[in-house]
Image (cartoon, grey):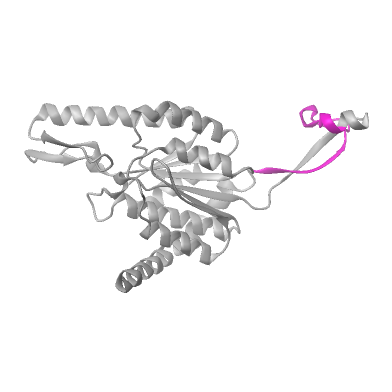
Amino acid sequence: MQQSENDILRRVRKIEIKTRGLSNEIFAGKYHTAFRGRGMSFSEVREYRAGDDVRDIDWNVTARSSKPHIKIYEEERELTMMLLIDVSGSRLFGSTERTKKNLITEIAAVLAFSAAQNNDKVGCIFFSDRIEKFIPAAKGRSHILMIIRELIKFEPESRRTSISEAVRFMTNVNKKRCTTFILSDFLSPKSEQAQLEDALKIAGSKHDLVGIRVVDRREAELPDVGIVEVQDAETDRKVWVDTSSRRVREHYAEQWRERERQTVEMLRRGRIDTATISTDGDYVVELIKLFKQR
């Protein structure tokens, strides 16, 4: 047990050195440009003046005072970042040197340190088909390291996926506007798509949502390795597949492309900026692209 604990501490330190360096050198400024100044908070009420926007009139105060008053807003000095982390069974897949879980951990750490560089709060929600763990937003290096530690060692109770559950929870616990990154492979059941789209629409009207799709190239196509038994990482269902059949491989690839198209379209309809990052890709390049497009 002690060895395992020491291993976790070493991994936390290794991730901190790598991701904090990236945050300091590359991302902090780009994060600041992309996300700062988007939130506006209520400041005070004053009497209406010629030229003021009538949409800002506070009708309650106006009625009480018999004079028109408007609400004054000011740019929020600090933001809150929420990380929605998919901890379902499919995150353990990876056909390269790193799994989707490893990639999610590094990306989350980079984002968290980038926010910390700008003195923003960072919170975290671990989700499967339920809320597995909620870490309220806070500041500081020790808080970020605690999140990274949880990213490494956390073991969920369930292996299934419900992104809509996490999005609804995030909306309920954050009354003030925040920037929310959803780190997931977005492989939720088809039966959940309508609920997810509704949840994203409601959350998007209150918060700044960003989707980071973590994928592995082996998910998109089957290798030709004969007859193999495959198992669903979330339901444990097992089936035998003849991967030597070209028709089977083509059908699988076509189904995957269709599912991917539907996911991308759903996020686009919700006006959610999205980056797709592969386990064998360079997440630094993709994150910079994401920040630049905002």
- Quadrant location, the N terminus: bottom left
The answer to which image quadrant residue 186 occupies is: top left
Q: Residue at x 52, y 41 (%)?
A: 169
Residue 278, how many percent across, how many down? 32, 46
Q: Nearer the viewer, residue 229 or 96?
A: 229
Q: Residue at x 35, y 53 (%)?
A: 103
Res 62 visible: yes
Q: Based on the picture, tell me whether residue 57 belongs to the magenta stretch.
A: yes
Res 271 visible: no
Q: Nearer the viewer, residue 212 or 282?
A: 212
Residue 150, how many percent across, how many down? 42, 59
Q: Residue at x 45, y 64 (%)?
A: 21
Per the rendered image, the range of residues in magenta is 39-61
Residue furthest front as drawn: 157
Residue 172, how many percent across, how many down? 57, 40
Q: Is residue 248 above or below residue 11?
A: above
Q: How many circles with numbers are drawn on the protein?
A: 0
Residue 43, how many percent across, how many down? 78, 45
Q: Is residue 218 above or below residue 149?
A: above
Residue furthest right as drawn: 66
The answer to which image quadrant residue 88 occupies is: top left
Q: Is residue 57 left or right of residue 266?
A: right
Q: Based on the picture, tell me whether residue 268 belongs to the magenta stretch.
A: no
